[in-house]
Image (spheres, rainbow, N blue to C red):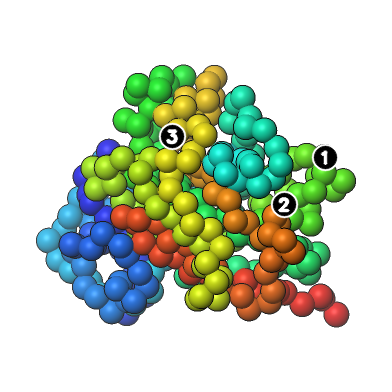
Amino acid sequence: MATFSRLVRFRNPAGQIFYGEVPGVDFVTQESLQGSKVAVYKGETPFEDDFGLTGHQEEIAEVLAPLPYVPIFECVGVNYLKHVQETGGEPPKYPVIFKKPADALAGPFEDIPIHPECQSQMDYEAELCVVIGKDCKNVTTEEALNYVLGYTAGNDVSARYWQWRERSGGQHGSAKGFDKFAPIGPVIVSPSAIGDPHNLWLKTIVNGTDVRQQSRTDDLIFKLPEIIKHLSRGTTLRKGTVIMSGTPSGVAAFMKPPGFLQDGDVVTVEIEKIGRLENKYVFERENL
């Protein structure tokens, strides 16, 4: 797999798209990236055999999603103990899995379009995300992290209206799989730069000041090797697959009263050693 520390995918002032190496920063923001110059890599994705630094630099004009496409998002529900407790449920015996399609991918600073039939109960979920770096199947917990390209931050955008059992039959995917309902970024951080992925703080802030979620990844019920083992049991995980590992307590749906999002609200997700993504929820109008 590719050797890097912090990968950013971006467009330069001429409109060309590159991968670059972010130097000397362990928490990346739009402000720290935009306008800076970074060493660029050869190749359109970090999965190519010849992906490597070219020796020249380019200016970042726009930060893009850290992957141009994904095969699928594999997502884990109710995977933080305090989140399970706020729902009133019991910890699951096995990981609760749902999926988001490829078109759910969005960049770390893109607006998120909200369909008119989703707008009454919109929510956020801060997630530590794992990027699979090479195809794998039937992996053990001991070898699971060897297949990880890196880590990034994500927001599991959720239309709770479509998640409640009377409309979903208990299946989460349709409520969470709308276009651009999976913003990730702003960088992919290598396993060596992350260190222990189960010892990171993460936070969700609404409109700049309202801290909704604040936790550490040591509250995960199923750790990342267990999740990868479970997902790869009899199933090929393709390179580029993004695993959303779960969200901590503090989601809008379980606030008293519920704190569902409104048109124009901005959701910020921050994760230690990765950085900050920030997305505005934009309610679409009914077609006339």
Q: Residue at x 42, y 40 (%)?
A: 218
Q: Are marks 3 and 2 in contact (CB under 8 Å)?
A: no
**In the rendered image, is residue 111 in sight?**
no
The quarter in which the N terminus is drawn is top left
Q: Earlier in the sequence, mark 1 or mark 3?
A: 1
Q: Determine which residue is flagged by label 3.
A: 224
Q: Residue at x 35, y 69 (%)?
A: 29
Q: Residue at x 69, y 74 (%)?
A: 262
**Is residue 206 found left or right of 29 in the rendered image?**
right
Q: Amino acid at mark 2?
A: Ala
Q: Determine which residue is flagged by label 2.
A: 175
- Per the image, label 1 sits on a secondary structure element best described as loop
Residue 245 image point, x, y percent: 50, 42
> In the figure, 137 relative to 276: above or below?
above
Q: Amino acid at mark 3?
A: Leu
Q: Residue furthest left?
A: 55
Q: Determine which residue is flagged by label 1.
A: 169
Q: Residue at x 74, y 64 (%)?
A: 257
Q: Choose between 77 and 22: the one closer to the eye.
A: 77
Residue 126 image point, x, y percent: 52, 55
The quarter in which the C terminus is drawn is bottom right
